[in-house]
Amino acid sequence: MPVYVYEHVNKPGKGCTKEIEVHQEFGSEHFSKCPKCGRKVKRIITTANFTIDHLSGTSLKEKGFSKLVRKDKGVYEVEGAPLSSHKD
């Protein structure tokens, strides 16, 4: 479920911060009021935060996937073993 960031339009209510993060289903309606204090909020655009360390060869293997690594033109390896060779 995506995390959306909302910002209080004016001063946040007691116990709230200027920005809040909310887990919402993709495509759900945006909040117009803070779910905690009830004051007016607007959704702000943020950058996507992705990490790629979960795509390491070991992690992929544990999840049942193989990682192809290009060694030469038309030559790929799967975790150190040659997969195919193609010559033009």
Image (cartoon, rainbow, N blue to C red):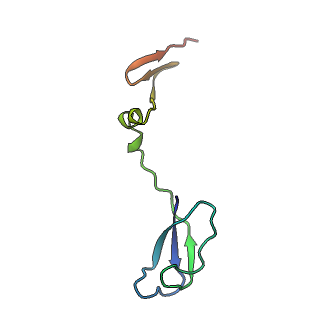
Seen at 46% across and 87% down, the residue is 13
29 left or right of 49?
A: right
Seen at 39% across and 25% down, the residue is 79
**How far across and how far down the image is residue 40, in percent?**
56, 83
**How far across and how far down the image is residue 20, in percent?**
46, 74
Figure disc tally:
0
| Residue closer to the observer: 1 or 52 | 1
Seen at 61% across and 71% down, the residue is 30
Q: Quadrant of the C terminus?
A: top right
5 in relation to 85, above or below: below
Seen at 52% across and 60% down, the residue is 2
Task: Return the residue found at the far top.
Answer: 87
80 left or right of 25?
A: left
| Residue closer to the observer: 14 or 70 | 14
| Residue closer to the observer: 10 or 29 | 29
Q: Which quarter of the figure has residue 62?
A: top left
41 left or right of 62?
A: right
84 in relation to 10, above or below: above
**How far across and how far down the image is residue 87, in percent?**
55, 11
